[in-house]
Image (cartoon, rainbow, N blue to C red):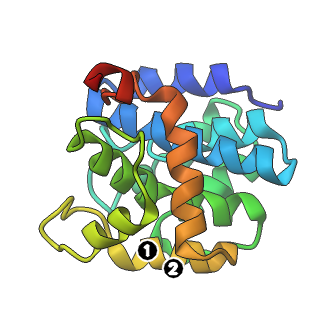
Amino acid sequence: MRPTREQAWETLTQYTKSEALLRHALAVEASVGHYAELYGEDEDFWRATALLHDFDYEVHPTLDEHPQDGAPMLREAGYPEELIEAVLSHAEHLALPRDTQLKKVLFACDELSGFVHACGLVRPTGLDGLEPKSVKKKLKQPSFAAGVHRDEVYAGAELLGLELDEHIRNVVAALQPIAKELGLRTAADAA
Ligand SMILES: [Fe+2]
Ligand SMILES: [Fe+2]
């Protein structure tokens, strides 16, 4: 079967109740979907993959289980290997090749989406007016969003062959339309 975004959302919410994790999934979905559109790829399939990349994190919160023990669950639910392989490849500790555009984009969007989201949360206008310069400045402050692996942010942009500025701009643009769902303010709220 070719999974849809809606099916992926159903599977995700079956295993994930935490609002923070659901927001993370939505943020990564938006970024990956944005790149699918930019690259003329199968947006619905890419979105489904992104939504599911951490679907088992609540039941498998440690790296000796996540995401590898989630893979059989996805297989059981009928998801195709192409999606499962991409999900597995986001995990650094599994050291799998990122040999498709989807795998590259998923990896590149995972940490940066979380980081840009965090930047938006501390600004009165959320993501509106957020420039790559200030995101990069925050990347250099280890105490800010300390859980985000900086090395993976830099490696992601490189993997896509993009300047970090451009990658940041893409992710900011991707998250802006779902600011409300991410719990972010907008320039309209600040006015
Ligand atoms: Fe993960
Ligand atoms: Fe993630």
Q: Residues within 10 Å of mark 2 (few under 14, many from 20)?
A: some
Q: Residue at x 57, y 38 (%)?
A: 30
Q: Which mark is residue 152?
A: 1
Q: Nearer the viewer, residue 108 or 79?
A: 108
Mark 1 Cβ inside 8 Å of ligand 2: no
- Percent x, y of residue 76: 62, 34
Q: Quadrant of residue 34?
A: top right
Residue type at mark 1 is Glu
- Whether pointer 2 and pointer 1 mark residues with C-beta atoms closer than 8 Å, the reply is yes
Q: Is residue 156 left or right of residue 179?
A: right
The span from disc 2 to disc 1 (Cα, nearest Å) is: 5 Å
- Percent x, y of residue 186: 36, 28
Q: Is residue 97 left or right of residue 141?
A: right
Q: Quadrant of the N terminus?
A: top right
In the depicted structure, whether residue 35 falls above or below residue 9 = below
Q: Residue at x 29, y 63 (%)?
A: 148
Q: Secondary structure at mark 2?
A: helix
